[in-house]
Amino acid sequence: MAIEAVASVVLQKLTDMLEEQLLTQNKVIVYEVQEIIKSLNSMRDLMISIKEIKQQAEEYLDSVYMVEDGIEKFTLNAVRRRKVFGLLTNHIFFFNNLNSCRHIHQNIQKIITQLMKLRDHEYLIIEVQNKHKNEEENLDENHNTQSTNHLEELSFCYSCNEDTMQIVGIKECFQQTKQMSRFSYKEEELGIFGLKEDVNTLVNHLVTDNSQHVVSIVGLGDIGKTTLARTIYKSRDIKRHFQFRAWVSKLDDYFTKDVLLNLLKATGSMTDKSMNMDDEKALKFKLSTFLKNKRYLVILDGVSTCNIWEDLKDIFPDVKNGSKLVLTSSQTMETTEVSLFLHRMMPLSEDDSWEMFKKNVGLLKTKDPSSWSQVFYSEENCLNVLSLCFRDLSDHLKVCLLYSVLFPKHFDIPVRRLLCLWVAEGFVKHTSTKSFPDDTAETYFEELVNRNMFQISKLRSDNSPRRCRVLGVVHDFLLPKAKKTNLFYTYCKFINFEEVECPKNEQGIDKREVTKKENAAYPPLSRYLTSFEIETPNSFSPKKSQPKSYPFNPVHLGSYMSFNHKKTGYRQANQIGSFLGNIINSGIGLLRVLDLEGVYKPILPENLGNLCNLRYLGLRSTYLDSLPPSVGELTHLETLDMKHTCIDELPGSICRLKKLRHLNLNEMILKMEPHSSLRLLTLSGLFLNEKVPIKDGLDKLHDLRELGITFHLRSNQKDMMDWIANFNDLRSLRLRSKDELGRPSKLTLRSMLKLMQLSHLNLLGHLEKLPSQNDFPPTLKVLTLSISLLKQDPMETLGQLPCLTVLRLLGDSYIGKEMVCRKGGFSKLRELKLWMLKELESWYVEEGSMVSLKHVEIRCCEKLHNIPTTLLQKKQLENLVVTGMPRVFTTEIECLISDHTSMTINQWI
């Protein structure tokens, strides 16, 4: 299952890459690329539709990886040649490109041929099973003996032709089908508890109501939607009323063509040899023609998206003859369809649940309590639940989850890092042109959190997730699956990269030679590599997880992540440099992710720009001193993270990186070129002075969502604020005004009312006065003020901000003596920090103010006499932290504080 998901996502990624990559203007090459895309789509459809592919899954996945390597190598060569030869590339390398395209196409066609043979085998088995199933339904109990004899004859008939049809064990398949059929019927009878009313309601609606064409059965997972639908489907009244019935199930990985083929099988139209099975329009026409004059019932079981209805509704026209389409889903259908009847299933009542339990519990009624405990706490049950949850995920969610075990067990993963990595790896299926893949990645993460696959380990101040981790039991469950797919390899000791060689291959990278080499124990097809300095849990042990010893060939490597955060001199730094140099010198370099976050001063080769496929370069907290100028040649780069480094100069060529979305700097200057095509979403750590142009420069950036600027400006602050005021989607803004010596300086603000998405605002610098309530965006949730030197009490204005949940007044942000929080103010405030307000003496909180406050922290407000009693007695106040305050102050607070509040006293931090 994991292998199928990986294959599906890889093929989708390659299709998207070919469609958006401008490889050449030559019509012949364009035609060849289009043919490759068609073949990739056919290959993906086949791999998803074939349910019996598990036995050959690893072999086919290796073939998919081969195709991936070949296409990426082809596109990278095209990019490199265009850099050198420009417009002459199409003419000079025409035959090279043509041969490469045809070679790739031939490899794909070989795989497709094998898959089609397997599919034909499966279709034949399904057709025979369906025929057997229909016969069992139509025969009553008096003809059971005849049905069995007929089945044996049918089995013998097909088994006689096993050699010509390449069918093995067809007779055994029939015997298993008979047993499964009896067992399923018994399960259905046992599962009818509490559903009789649902059955009666739906049967009556399907038979008598002609106004609503579509019926949607909605409910929680495993609540009994399929059982209910199957009971209705086999109802005597339903059989009598409808001229044609069809059932299609397992629509988790939905493709229109698969649904059409299954429905055509039910109609008996699959026997038409002249019909093109790959022509979706022809299949739709054939099915629509068949259903046109019939009263039909079609049940689509397990619909995971409403797109299926939008794609298929033309085939099922509402001709007002009583025809019905029934959908079962765990999600409410969001569709414009007006003739939709929604039936929402509710959990069983307590009495029905108990009756069902007593009926089904017979297998254990003779066991003692200790046996029951073993069943309840058995590890196998836990794994079964995990397997069920994993199977219910879409392919893209499965791959994103598998990828997360690249991180060590119990590792707190930064959410911003994880989402950018998913996008960089191509795991995010993005279709909308109005948004970015990052938005889709956020929805993936939210769904995995909702399904309890991720645990949020640290929250931001606004309760959004900052860090997450994969639960230990989930990590143990996923790790062998990820390794089985050759998705990655984990190395838990020091890697001697100097002994890693990259064998050059003139024929391309389809040839994978294996030669033994000491200190190299890596599977040759691994796509991702992680390394650790220290030993980790046994699940990461190379000896246990990799019984064979291979030389590691990094030309196949798609990602490298290091968690070696020890400062061990320059040994690790030099070895990483040698490792990257070998990859680059191989002339291939398929690396998409290079994540060295936390590695101490790794050495980056000067020709780093030759890694044309690189999407993610993570250098945060590496304390690097410089960046190779060739980084501006990484044309596919999407994320460049240099926060907490010593790099003070950025190559001007950075602005030509069209795909760069996230740029995290360390107070560096970014000079935008007048015709830059940069479309950043994140720009943090930017430094501005008078020499950096804003007009016809930075004002070319329109899509920013997160912006952090430190500036030394005397005359251009107005231009900067005018630029910022035009961001429609800005969510986080950090402004720090400093003078030439790095001290806080004057900060001039203007109205931010147009920033309708802004939720986080952090300001450092001297403010003449606080903007009025109407100048703040109404969406503001988190506000931090530092060294603002406000003379007027800011609480009057800030208390009126409707969405403010976190307020931090730090370091002389207010230099007045008195602070008053009025009645009705701060209605949603949950967290308040008052740090180093050295002149503050009195603080008053009126009744009805700060009604939602839960956390208060006071630090080094040495002249403050007390905390208001009205605040201390609030039952909702959970935590009070007092740091660096006089002992008299803390003693008085301890006497007044409510029993509902936890108080922490720190003498100095």
Image: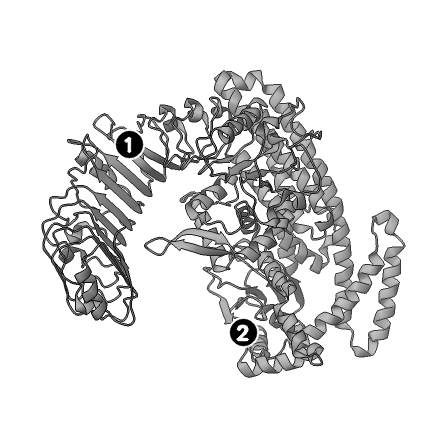
Q: Is residue 89 above or below residue 753?
A: above
Look at mark 2 in the image and give the residue it sits on.
209
User: Tag 2: residue type?
Assistant: Asp
Kindly indicate the quadrant of the structure image that contains residue 385. Answer: bottom right
Q: Is residue 732 visible?
A: yes
Task: Give whichever of 332, 596 is nearer the camera.
Answer: 596
Q: Can you give x and y, in whole percent of width and height, for residue 234 in the image?
A: 67, 72
Element carrying mark 1 = helix
Q: Can you give x and y, in whole percent of width and height, for residue 713 in the image?
A: 18, 32
**At 59% across and 71% down in the image, what residue appears?**
224
Q: Can you give x and y, in whole percent of width and height, for residue 364 in the image?
A: 69, 77
Q: Is residue 46 visible?
A: no
Look at mark 1 in the image and give the residue it sits on.
698
Whole-number angstrom distance, CA of label 2 to CA of label 1:
62 Å
Q: Residues within 10 Å of mark 2 (few under 14, many from 20)?
A: some
**At 69% across and 34% down in the image, what residue appears?**
550
**At 55% across and 46% down in the image, what residue appears?**
403
Element carrying mark 2 = loop
User: Which mark is drawn over residue 308?
Assistant: none
Camera-near label (2 vs 1) is: 1
User: How is this picture coloured?
Assistant: one colour
N-terminal of the pair, mark 2 or mark 1, is 2
